[in-house]
Image (cartoon, helix red, strand yellow):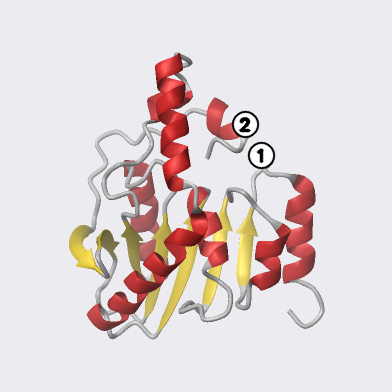
Amino acid sequence: MATCEACNTIPKVVVDDYKPAGFYNEDIGGLRCYVTGSPTSTRGIFDIYDVFGLSPQTMQGADLLAKALDALVIIPDFFKGNPINPEWFTDKSDAAQQAKDEWMKGNMNFPDYVPVLFSVAGAAKTTYPSVKSWASLGLCWGGKVTALASGDGTPFSVSGQVHPGRLAREDAEKIVIPHIVLASNGEDAEVVKQYSEILTGEGS
């Protein structure tokens, strides 16, 4: 997510000719969502994507997660079909960097996305009543949203972050549900350590 050197240097995973196993529900709580897995499952997961949006590898990951856990997995399209352009990370022209900066400015106010996620989660409970417990799993950009959505009033039973973006101690201090952080070596080791101490501390 442009806050980590890995995002600027490690090539994006390419999945050739991957055909998603799921489908699009055009309106769950006001957002178009990719849905995969059994609609009668008792477990549901919100897969909160990274800045690349509904990319093939993210949908493939959701499909694998749904199959492995026999879960219903939903990816809300927060960016409404307008994710960041991957080419902006390698194109060093002024125009590309300006476009990237403008996109970032318009999509990095993370608290704004929490009520949107809660709205989608509320609608999903009605649409998929067989699901008894919901989780949220955030990828990079989505990790920040997931962390902020894991405090008081959260609709989720558990949550987690993978290669989390913009880790902050104050976010960890507000988390009230079981939460896992799968950090890469690109994250700030000190903040990762703080997260671990808070989430595994006495009484957690």
State which quarter of the image contains the C terminus.
bottom right
Q: Is residue 199 left or right of residue 93?
A: right
Q: Nearer the viewer, residue 16 or 168?
A: 168
Number of residue marks: 2
Q: Nearer the viewer, residue 109 or 16?
A: 109
Q: For residue 117, which quarter of the picture?
A: bottom left
**Picture coordinates of residue 72 (x, y %)?**
33, 70
Asked if residue 111 shows in the view, the reply is yes
At 72% from the left edge and 59% from the top edge, which residue is drawn? 169
Amino acid type for the residue under numbered disc 1: Gly
Q: Secondary structure at mark 1?
A: loop
At 61% from the left edge and 37% from the top edge, which residue is drawn? 4
At 62% from the left edge and 64% from the top edge, which residue is drawn? 180
**Picture coordinates of residue 116 (x, y %)?**
37, 66
Q: Secondary structure at mark 2?
A: helix
At 28% from the left edge and 85% from the top edge, which residue is drawn? 129
From what the image shows, is residue 73 above or below residue 57? below
Mark 1: few/some/many CA within 10 Å (<14, 14-19, 20+): some
The residue where tag 2 is placed is 5
- Give me the C-alpha separation between circle 1 and circle 2: 7 Å
**Tag 1–tag 2 contact (CB < 8 Å):** yes
**Picture coordinates of residue 94 (x, y %)?**
45, 16
Q: Nearer the viewer, residue 63 or 86?
A: 86
Q: State the mark number for residue 81.
A: none
From what the image shows, is residue 140 above or below residue 24? above
Q: Earlier in the sequence, mark 1 or mark 2?
A: 2
The residue where tag 1 is placed is 186
Amino acid type for the residue under numbered disc 2: Glu
Q: Is residue 111 left or right of residue 79?
A: right
